[in-house]
Amino acid sequence: MKLMIFSGTTEGHDLCRFLSKNNVQAEVFVATEYGAAVMEPMAGITVHEGRLDEREMEKRLTSDTLLIDATHPYAAAVTDNLRAACAKSGARYERLLRPALPYQNCEIVLDTAAAVDWLNAHPGKVLLTTGSKELEAYTAVQDFQTRLFPRVLPTASVLEKCAALGFPGAHIIAMQGPFSQAMNAALLRETGAKILVTKDTGVSGGFAEKVAAA
């Protein structure tokens, strides 16, 4: 059986380490240069870098393939494409999904658009910890250049995107996680943020540390 892993999460990285340790070969697919860089060399693990659409995924799959989807919990489009490609090729699909965490004293919204609407109705500076993928949508927040402090991965392409969208350099926090409660609290204090925006990123995504810091 051919084993393929679509990664980009801590869980996917841990799975690769486990497979390598147990002499199991696998092909691992990550979307970005950053994703490839954080994957240390592991025996039996072949890393492929770059985004694939459904057709490109399907070309790589056969009926004797086991595909493990260890992509980010909110990467819905990728998961949909992987499931569709597996269905067409006859490959077996398994989802490695981190469990959600309980939370209290949080305002819950359904999606990014709803988060933007909520922010427009509530004044104050914002520590934005949802990454760069949907950053463009947050430019619809009134006075976003002065209110928002996006925390993003420290790559050239991400920083270029932030600048192109109009975020001033003094407001861009380019750092690699995970972040402790103390670090999150320090950033909230230093930026003067009264609001922290996050997704439920689970244990490995530091959700509890963000909630506790807020």
Image (spheres, rainbow, N blue to C red):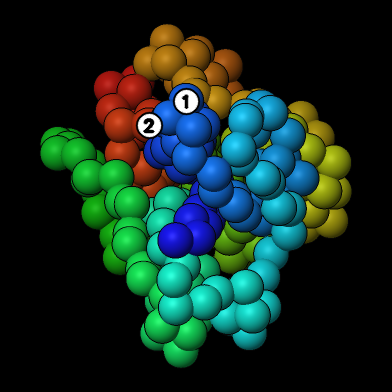
Q: Where, by quadrant of the figure, is residue 108 drawn?
A: bottom left
User: Nearer the viewer's eye, disc 1 or disc 2?
Assistant: 1
Looking at marks 1 and 2 on the same chain, the residue that comes earlier in the sequence is marked by 1
Q: Nearer the viewer, residue 108 or 1?
A: 1
* Percent coordinates x, y for residue 126 in the rendering: 50, 39
129 shown above or below 29: above
State the residue at coordinates (55%, 48%).
26
Q: Are marks 1 and 2 in contact (CB under 8 Å)?
A: no
- The amino acid on which the numbered mark 1 sits, given as a three-letter code, is Lys
Report whether 132 appears left or right of 20.
Answer: right
State the residue at coordinates (31%, 32%).
203
How many marks can you see? Answer: 2
State the residue at coordinates (62%, 29%).
42
Report whether 47 appears left or right of 187.
Answer: right
Q: Which residue is mark 2?
A: 204
Report whether 169 appears left or right of 181.
Answer: right
Q: Which residue is mark 1?
A: 21
Q: CA distance from mark 1 to mark 2?
A: 21 Å
State the residue at coordinates (85%, 41%).
156
- The amino acid on which the numbered mark 2 sits, given as a three-letter code, is Ser
* Percent coordinates x, y for residue 151 in the rendering: 60, 36
> Can I make out residue 114 in this image?
no
- Give the SS element for disc 2: loop
- Local packing at callout 1 (Cα closer than 10 Å; few below 14, some 14-19, many 20+) is few
147 shown above or below 65: above
* Percent coordinates x, y for residue 69 in the rendering: 42, 58
- Give the SS element for disc 1: helix
